[in-house]
Image (cartoon, rainbow, N blue to C red):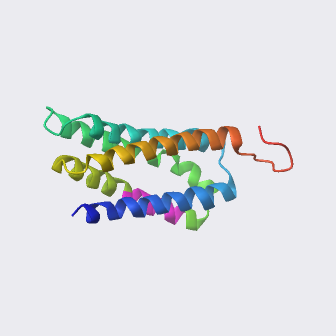
């Protein structure tokens, strides 16, 4: 059962790696996306942190997790007005796949949390999500060079 629940998580990871590693690097990110994408990741990390640090038996634990998940699912769509202008059709399609996977992944982690048998997976996912947010902040604000003819900032 755990492997089945982790299948959409792995698909999301592959899709995110492709989006970041191919599309974002190919076109670069305007300032709003360089700020917005780490914020997207922070909403995900917040929901995962709730799972890691809260017992499913805590009063209102499940409704709070659902609220955090719904907020994240809505929040990640904020850049679509920008994306409509700057993304290729292929990148737009990949974003739609990510939007479909986003709530499915929250559901999968919520079920693992509720069952209580995969705390190490949730902790690992939280760590990977925080590391990804740090990568997004540092790569796109420190290391990314929009003009390769000049030295990086």
> Does the rendering let one see residue 21?
yes
Magenta span contains residue 94: yes
Examine the residues drawn in magenta and state their main secondary structure: helix
Residue drawn at the location 61% of the way across and 64% of the way down? 88
Left or right: 151 in relation to 95: right
Residue drawn at the location 53% of the way across and 58% of the way down? 17
Magenta span contains residue 69: no
Residue drawn at the location 45% of the way across and 58% of the way down? 13
Displayed quadrant of residue 135 = top right
On-image quarter of the N terminus = bottom left
> Does the rendering let one see residue 87?
no
> Where does residue 114 sit, x and y in percent of width and height?
18, 47
Left or right: 74 in relation to 27: left
Q: Which residues are magenta?
A: 92-101
Seen from the viewer's position, the closer of residues 85 and 10 is 10
> Where does residue 31 sit, x and y in percent of width and height?
65, 40
**On screen, 121 above or below 142?**
below
On-image quarter of the C terminus = top right
Tell me how many marks there are.
0
> Where does residue 14 sit, x and y in percent of width and height?
48, 62
Left or right: 121 in relation to 115: right
Displayed quadrant of residue 98 = bottom left
Seen from the viewer's position, the closer of residues 127 and 92 is 127
**On screen, 93 above or below 86?**
below
Displayed quadrant of residue 96 = bottom left
Residue drawn at the location 83% of the way across and 42% of the way down? 151
Q: Residue furthest right?
A: 149
């Amino acid at each position: 059962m755990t492997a089945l629940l982790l299948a959409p998580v792995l698909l999301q990871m592959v899709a995110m790696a492709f989006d970041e590693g191919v599309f974002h690097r190919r076109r670069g990110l305007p300032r709003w996306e360089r700020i917005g994408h780490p914020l997207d990741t922070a909403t995900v990390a917040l929901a995962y942190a709730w799972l890691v640090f809260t017992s499913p038996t805590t009063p209102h634990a499940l409704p709070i997790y659902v609220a955090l998940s719904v907020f994240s699912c809505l929040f990640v769509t904020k850049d679509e007005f920008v994306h409509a202008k700057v993304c290729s059709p292929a990148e737009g399609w990949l974003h739609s796949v990510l939007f479909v996977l986003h709530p499915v992944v929250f559901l999968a982690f919520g079920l693992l949390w509720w069952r209580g048998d995969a705390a190490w997976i949730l902790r690992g996912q939280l760590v990977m999500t925080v590391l990804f947010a740090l990568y997004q902040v540092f790569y796109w604000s420190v290391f990314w060079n929009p003009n390769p003819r000049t030295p990086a900032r």
